[in-house]
Image (cartoon, rainbow, N blue to C red):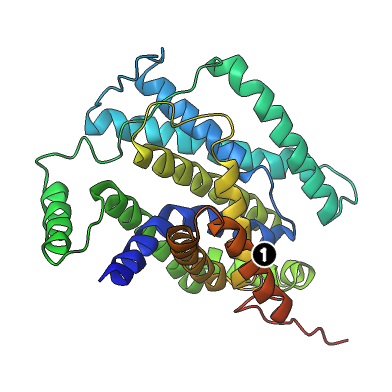
Amino acid sequence: MYIIELIINSILQSGPLALATFAIVLIFRTSFTTNFAQGMIGTVAAFITTYILMPSPDITGNVPSPTFLTYLIAISVGIIVSFIISMLVDIVIFRNSKYITPVGKQIVTMGIVLIITGLIPFFFGISDRSLPRIGANLEGTFIDTILLSGVEGLRDIGIFVKYHMVLGFLISFIIIGTLFIMLKYTRWGLGVRATASNENVASMMGINTRFITAMSWAIAGGLGALAAILISSNKGTFGNVTVYFMVAIQVQAFFAAILGGFSTFHGPIIGIILLTFFKNLFTSYLNPWGNTVLYLFVLLIVLIKPLGLFGKKIAKKV
């Protein structure tokens, strides 16, 4: 029963992490680079959300319990700001940089990390901030009733799961599922897949690759923002929003993308589920060496399959 509980909890935990992972892969597939600023842009969204809910942080640890509408507005503003920041990175910086290479883009995103790191204390102060649990304001609603029945049903059979973790997973699942449907059945999705296959050919076929890349960066920024908000709020502790709290999350997202394979959209999502499961498994039985064994395990897999578990070698015809 313990291993079943471990599997279920690992799947639930991987929900918000999948948002961060998908964001990284989306930018890689359309801009052919890795965005090291993804986590820091999401951190900005988390700080904005906390600032709207509580402009002056309470050092005693008292976190307000906002109404559903207030929380929704705060989250929306944070996501929109991250959406705009990420879009501007592509439109203002990369689009106007002559002959910039994928490595050059990586260096630029690292510079953005340094800039945001310095600006966060300037705009939001040096104190850590806190977000209330994402579902604390749903008490008595229809959603709350459904979630409670599911959580209590699992607990009745001996599987303990957290209410807020289930809610975070459902939100992430709906968004990721919607994005996969859009990738398969919409003009935007066709443009993304064509750009990912060959940007020059896609452009000659009439696809506005500039729009595709700009929207990919923007959507990735929104996904990173929501991931940061869900992850920090699910902690339920004072000071859960700090300048560097997304660093570990971004590292996990990169590992998941490497494990699943950057050449597919579904591979990294499966990769984050596997990574979360093995992390929990190794931490439970091999503590304090769990993370070390996990990274060695991922390294071994990559040595055997350099392109990842689901990666495919792209053969170019001349």
Q: Which residue is mark 1?
A: 29
**316 above or below 215?**
below
Q: Amino acid at mark 1?
A: Arg
- Is residue 98 shown left or right of residue 171? right
Q: How many marks?
A: 1
Q: Residue furthest bottom?
A: 317
Q: Quarter of the image containing the N terminus?
A: bottom left
| Residue at disc 1, secondary structure | helix
Q: Quarter of the image containing the C terminus?
A: bottom right
Which of the 4 image quarters holds residue 51? top left
- Is residue 36 shown left or right of residue 78? right
In the rendered image, is residue 208 in sight?
no
Which of the 4 image quarters holds residue 233? top left
- Is residue 91 shown left or right of residue 39? right
Please tell me which residue is depicted at 47% across the width and 61% down the height of the picture.
276
In the rendered image, is residue 2 in sight?
yes
